[in-house]
Amino acid sequence: MKSKTLTCIICPNGCTIDVKAHDNGDIEVSGNKCPRGKEYAVQELFDPRRTISSTVRIEGAMLPLCSVRLDRPVPKKEIFAVMEEINKVSIKAPSHIGDVVIENVCGLGANVIVTKNLDKI
Amino acid sequence: MRTHDAVIIGGGPAGLAAAVQLKKNGIDDILIIEREKHLGGILRQCIHDGFGLTRFGVTLSGPEYSQRFIDMANELGVSTVTNATVIDLNGDRVITAATQQGLLQVQGKAVILTMGCRERTRGALAIPGTRPAGVFNAGVTQSYVNLYNTMVGKEVLIMGSGDIGLIMARRLTLEGAKVKGVFEIMPYPSGLPRNIEQCLNDYDIPLYLSHSVVEIKGQERIEGVRVVQVDESFRPIEGTEKYFSCDTLVLSVGLIPENELSLAAGVELDWRTNGAVVDEFYQSNVPGIFAAGNVLHVHDLVDFVSKEAEAMAEGVAEYLKNGALPECGLEIKAGNDIGHLIPQRVSGKRDFKLSLRVRKPWGKCCLEVRQGETVLKSLKLAKAIPAEMIELVIPAEKMNSVEDLEVRVYEI
Ligand SMILES: Cc1cc2nc3c(=O)[nH]c(=O)nc-3n(C[C@H](O)[C@H](O)[C@H](O)COP(=O)(O)OP(=O)(O)OC[C@H]3O[C@@H](n4cnc5c(N)ncnc54)[C@H](O)[C@@H]3O)c2cc1C
């Protein structure tokens, strides 16, 4: 049997969730207030994933940096590999929320997208 | 002097949400005055995600969340002046602002206070030791790293377990720093459980509860701190002292609502919130002056800030249409275990929303709002912690308009 007690990070409720995966394939989840918590707990037990946010350099804007994030979670152990790719990027103003700056980063199926509108000056 | 129906001081999430909601209520003549070059407030530097789950049902980063409100305000044609710092407000609701074009004086039929808050600094904590470089507030660190491409250090300690400190522990780790630990003087963290999980546990950053920084060492640059474990009365426990080397100390020790302008206008403040005393319409003791968001009481979630500002805007719209609001003569008294509550006064005639924080963590407990012998509302909770604001709607049906209200929490 595989089991874990964890704090849900999906919303500010931060439920304490117990998740148990029995050898016969049954999965028991308790402590979650919503279905998203259940989904998170099961995911967390077998394949923990996170989205991360960071910045990339931007030329020609009022600020030297533009904020970015992943559009879907990636395996936790790949976070630093993703950061390395993000750190290589430099973009040119203007930036628009949703612009893709890295497609399918590290082959993980997630894109790195812009989260701030910055005008060209 | 120009007059407007409503003048909003501060174009952060609270000010923007108020403006949008006023427009939707048919109040057209609005002006937002903002100190920074851009609207959006503190969220411009909060690049992590997790915003908007309550308000929009999706998870967004701070800049995306505020852009949604900026777009709505623009579409509705809200007038704004940026690069303009309000330096005075008086009881007649006359505002003086320093702008690039010189002094601006305007009067609002209603004035809305949405100036947000600032961070508590080392000076306010009186930590003994030298005064070296390398000691930063968490929000300042956030703006250096996320806006100005300036890394603060390599070997970092964090004092205080507020959410901004936790968020920065993760952010600095992602940017290559070694974050060696977070020290919290209380026996429980002041940040949200999800941030302990995803910002500290994910990166194996230790959290030292009941620990206090007792000395800062270093001449030019900070070299380390002495830390000691404390007992329930916050007295150092002998033999527990440790030394941690570092080149940076980040302070995440609380926020203080920015109320200098409010005081100048004669607005009464509550010693528990450091914000205005308001009624159920979010009106202060000075008629026509309203407040919402972090300037009223410190929020940890912007979704609640937006909703509070929208509720306030309903009150402002009613005030502008009728020239006055119903009298709110009843006081809401907080029991000993309630940290603070908003509003402090009500009319007793309408449903209202009560926001509060408990003073210490509780397991299974019940929150109860009474008026004399009548229980107006009771809410059972599996747990309650100071880090989470609790909101509940109090229905008018059982309320009378003569007796004060009382809120308490008890174990079940
Ligand atoms: C450093 C920091 C990080 C935070 N991180 C998070 C987070 O990660 N998630 C979350 O949900 N919440 C976070 N919060 C809570 C956050 O405060 C709220 O989410 C929200 O931003 C508060 O909105 P507000 O409009 O009340 O204040 P603010 O966003 O602070 O906006 C106030 C605005 O008023 C302007 N202003 C102030 N004084 C004047 C003046 N005299 N004249 C003209 N303009 C003035 C300021 O420039 C600012 O734009 C954070 C708060 C801080 C301080």
Image: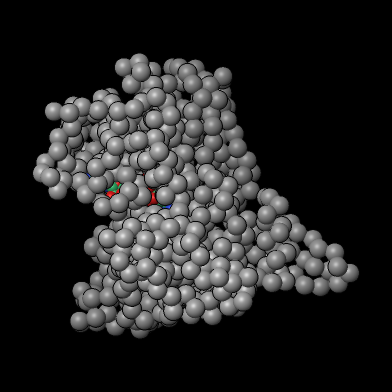
Q: Which quadrant of the structure image shows residue B410? A: top right
Q: Is residue B343 above or below residue B200?
A: above
Is B235 placed left or right of B106 in the picture? right
**Point 54% across, 60% down: residue:** B193
Image x and y of residue B320, in percent: 33, 21
Image x and y of residue B156, in percent: 38, 77
**Point 53% across, 76% down: residue:** A82
Nearer-the-camera pick, B91 or B318: B318
Image x and y of residue A8, in percent: 62, 60
Nearer-the-camera pick, A62 or B239: A62
Is B315 placed left or right of B10 in the picture? right
Nearer-the-camera pick, A98 or B382: A98
Q: Quadrant of the C terminus of chain B?
A: top right
**Point 42% across, 64% down: residue:** A67
Q: Is residue B335 visible?
A: no
Q: Is residue B355 visible?
A: yes
Q: As drawn, which residue projects farthest toward the right? A: A24
Is A28 placed left or right of A57 in the picture? right
Q: Is residue B400 above or below residue B233?
A: above
Image x and y of residue B160, in percent: 39, 65
**Point 26% across, 52% down: residue:** B37
Q: How is the image coloured?
A: one colour
Q: Quadrant of the N terminus of chain B?
A: top left
Q: Is residue B78 above or below residue B298?
A: above
